[in-house]
Amino acid sequence: MWHDSVLGTVGNTPLVRINRLAEEVPCTVLAKVEFFNPGGSVKDRIGISMVEDAEEKGLIEPGGTIIEGTSGNTGAGLAIAAIAKGYRCIFTTTDKQSQEKVDVLRALGAEVLVCPTNVEPDDPRSYYSTARRLAEEIPNSIYLNQYDNDSNTQAHIETTGPELWEQTEGKITHFIAGAGTGGTISGTGRYLKEQNEDVTVVGVDPYGSVFYKYFHEGVFDHDEIYPYVTEGVGEDILPENMDFDVVDDFVRVDDKTTMQMTRRLAREEGLFIGQSCGMAMAGALQWLHDHKATLTEDDVVVVLLPDSGFRYLSKTYNDEWMRSHGFMENRTNVTVEHVLKRRPASEAVIAASPEDTLGSVIERMTEKGISQMPVLNEENEVVGSITETQILNELIASPDARDEAVENVMGDPLPVVPTSLHLEHLSSYLESGAGAVLVETNASDGAYSVITKSDLIGALAHANGNGAS
Ligand code: PMP
């Protein structure tokens, strides 16, 4: 069995259960994994349908030129369809899209014009206007306009919706997806609701896009439009393909949450997916969490994951890029408590009393392999500290130092810090003289733990790039 062209491999993408990330919710959460399409995204589906629709309507003739404004994925879908059917492609995109996407389009033989992101949609420089102008200038060309072209939504009514219905044997109860043109959520949502009107459809919007407010308040608010980093979702226009009647609720997600969830899907579920997938999943988990009381184990939630991680290697999957945008899990979220958790169950702190002799302290330090001790009095109050260096200085100064009492030699008490202290602040304590700090782990019975520089190094090395653990 074979396909006549690569177009035959579009669609019928798998549903994969989300395991770790969905542990907290009572229902089944499934991902519709669209990177299995040959062009690497959900947009292959509309590539075919928009081109075939134009052919059927006689809007394009053999050898003609397909023009489209695309964040990259629609371009790949169209380029594949154009290769199979013999058309030339010119795409306009914005300078916000990752280089990988532009490279894919060029690899598939398309010409690409990169336009500025932060201009008004009707500005002649915008990627919408540029696409329109090219279509007027180039003979036998068509501007497909995925935003307002009905065959976009239609592709999902004919493919994505029926696939989900069949794959879940009609058990799907919720469909959650991001929206760019709105084709995916509107078409899939409409089909599913036609099968079962009780299916709940939830849209996920990035902060900076207009959909969320328009859905909740019916207002197209220019002040809501501001730059965000997540690619392919959210809009500064209301596309005709965005059918708000199909949507039951809209949530929104910020860029940082999106990027971190994108990475977690890769690391914790093995799904190497793109940014808008992280956004959809973060929005979905947020919505499911907020509606936990209404969910049962019979609920089957499908979250659509539009594209592949390969398109974001230089961005979300690059530590430097993540750091420069402030998207990395902030070290300051890691607290002293995290350091303590990395240790075996805490035993009583090894402390000296003011009356102990230096000789007994040396023995205990050697036996336990430690280089400093807090000094606690009978009431368990911290009254001082004793370090290897102080003992060494005493031994050099006096041969009888072994019999000296700790209270005559000890230094200032180690600082006592709370378990909630962020590691950034902890390191400043350790750098400013004290080689260690005390943490009051049980205030009622005066139990303490000691944290040293090597504990801090261990905790930070562990937290590096992985977030708090
Ligand atoms: N995610 C990505 C990465 C996309 O490129 C797009 C399409 N712009 C979407 C999600 C949204 O899909 P739709 O246009 O069907 O709403």
Image (cartoon, helix red, strand yellow):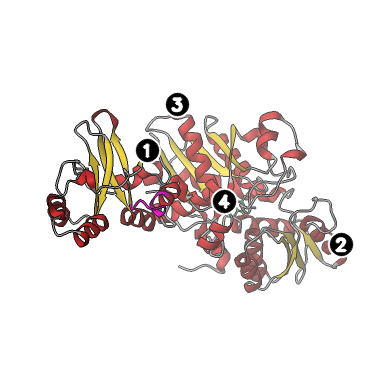
Residue labelled with disc 3:
294
N-terminal label among 1 and 3: 3
- Label 4 residue near ligand 1, CB within 8 Å: yes
Q: Residue at x 56, y 67 (%)?
A: 6
Residue placed furthest toward the right: 137
Q: Nearer the viewer, mark 3 or mark 2?
A: 3
Q: Residue 442, relative to residue 20: is it above or below? A: above
- Label 2: which residue? 136
Q: How many other residues sit within 10 Å of disc 2, few (<14), some (14-19) or many (≥20)?
A: few
Label 4 sits on residue: 276
Q: From this viewpoint, is residue 313 visible?
A: yes
Q: Position of residue 208 (x, y in %)?
A: 67, 44
Q: Nearer the viewer, mark 1 or mark 2?
A: 1
User: What separation in Å lies between label 4 and label 3 (alpha carbons)?
Assistant: 26 Å
Q: Secondary structure at mark 4?
A: helix
Horizontal relation, residue 327 to residue 413: left or right: right
- For badge 2, the amino acid type reads Glu
Q: Secondary structure at mark 3?
A: helix
- What kind of residue is marked 3? Thr
Secondary element at image label 2: helix
Q: Position of residue 128 (x, y in %)?
A: 78, 55
Q: Amino acid at mark 4?
A: Ser
Q: Residues within 10 Å of mark 1 (few under 14, many from 20)?
A: some
Task: Tell me the distance, in whole angstroms, between the alpha carbons under discs 1 and 2.
Answer: 68 Å
The amino acid marked with disc number 1 is Pro
Magenta segment range?
A: 429-435
Q: Are marks 2 and 4 in contact (CB under 8 Å)?
A: no
- Is residue 19 in view? no
Instruction: Determine which of the numbered discs, if any, sits on residue 418 in the image.
Output: 1
At a point 14% along the width and 51% down the height, the residue shown is 364
245 vs 118: above or below: above
Kindly indicate the quadrant of the structure image that contains residue 56.
Answer: bottom right
